[in-house]
Image: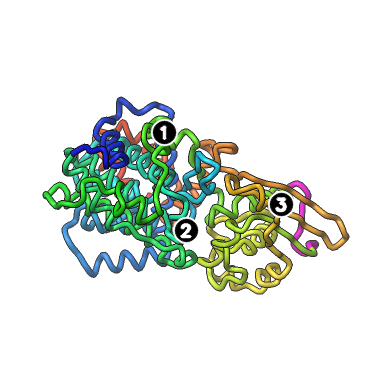
Amino acid sequence: MSSADSLITDAVVEFILGTGAAQIPEDVKVISRRCFVDGAGLMVAGSTDNSGRIVQAYAKEIGGEPEARIVGTDMTVPAHTAAFANGVAAHAMDYDDTQLSSYPDRIYGLMTHPTSPVLAASLAMAELLGSTGEELLTAFMIGFEVECKVAECIKPEHYIKGFHSTGTIGAIGAAVASAKLLGLDEAQLRFCLGIACSESAGLRANFGTMTKPFHSGRAAENGVVAARLAAGGFTSDPSIFDGDWGFMQIMGGGCDPEYLVGKLGDPWSAVDPGISIKPYPSGSLSHPSMDAMRDLILEHDIKPEDVKSVRLGTNARVLEPLRYDEPENELEAKFSMKYSLGILLLNGGKGGIAQYRDEVVESPEVKAMLKKIEPFVDEEIEAMGYDLIRSKLTIEMEDGTVHEKFSDTSRGTPKRPMDREELYVKFTECCSLVYEKDQIARAEAILYKVDTLDGVYTLIDVLGPKVEE
């Protein structure tokens, strides 16, 4: 089916079919295991979120064959439903990892949340099929890589005009992982991609609502559905990424083929430019500024009552999505630069799950602090471009002292990576919403050796409901 008119699709298909565990470098596997730990912990945490509970109730209503586990619960549901529920849960707290851009003309940090949809889909499909741990990790890594390269290849107008790439391109990554686990042949794989691209959806207008994590869940579900339909003979356009009516043109106004062709697995996106593991459960565009605030608080022992004013200069593409100056709930607070800075001031530099709760957002102390904070577009920073998330933080104290810090990166990025101990602190924060410490430790240990498992059920069991100790 290969054609000169299907350059992008051919490259994707050839990479998927030609890549197995033996072709994937060890450094990619090391990072991918870390993504498993981070993503699985977030699924556990998200199972307790309001959005997660609503999805679980919906899953009970619709029923179906018990094929795969909803993480953090005792519920076993159809594989596509499990993928949906776990994808929503993984993104519910906006604490999941983010893809970085390799090119300065792309927008740093605005590519995808690559792990959530791919992990949710591959975990459900692997349980359905009884796959080995190596098969699961391999499928995840290949789906992850295709997702990241497609996100880089499509023109940035895709995101700028309002598509949420975790929903749109995440569906492609989820479909690839599912297809790999099913062992689809070339024709079926092309049909799977065509189906997934027609399912692709997600609008940034829904940031700050439950529908943002819905995008991740639906992407995971769509990937499972596309692969299973294609395995049954369901057809689609076999060159879906290419042409005037193809994915790249319709969804992004075109693409840069050289960002994908010859680049799949060379280098692997998980390694170069790498993945950012979030240090805070909020929009990633706020994180360099939040770390600057945290650093100043800890360095100067800043107390909230001593702060007169805070000014944060950055570029327009940082402030546009972080648009809630007066958030009314925890979901809006995740997309509020003012809130994310203010909550650190009020909590001695802490900004975790406990700080992004409705009752905290509604408190008089928070509302008073937000009045002191002013984010604005800094023309000098705007002129530097969008390859980095740059900002300048200025804190004026009541006694006239001024503290300043420029930032363009944050903890969890390749420049300031989390070590295993730091990631375990985050994993514990997430999993302690359901599990006791012994189960948390067992889960983390199994996730780090996932590709040595003869079957995935050992992992599924430890990621089920709380085990009484």
Q: Which mark is residue 93?
A: 2
Q: Is residue 303 magenta?
A: yes
- Counting residues from the N terminus, which is met first, the one under dot 3 or under dot 1? 1
Left of 446 or right of it: where is 279?
A: right
Other-residue count near label 2 (Cα within 10 Å), few / some / many at <14 / 14–19 / ≥20: many
- Residue 323, position as x, y percentages in the image: 57, 66
Marks 2 and 3 sit apart, C-alpha to C-alpha, by 33 Å
For the point 26% across and 58% down, the residue is 81
Q: Which residues are magenta?
A: 299-307
Q: Regarding mark 2 in the picture, which secondary structure is present there?
A: loop
Which residue in the structure is indicated by mark 1? 268
Quick one: label 2 or label 1, which is nearer the N terminus?
Answer: 2
**Total marks in image:** 3
Front-most of residues 358 and 189: 189
Identify the amino acid type marked 1.
Trp
CA gap, disc 3 and disc 1: 34 Å
Report if residue 466 is visible in the image: no
Q: Secondary structure at mark 1?
A: loop
Image location (x, y in percent) of residue 52? 37, 63
Q: Which residue corresponds to the image point at 34% horizontal and 46% vertical from the top-left?
A: 119
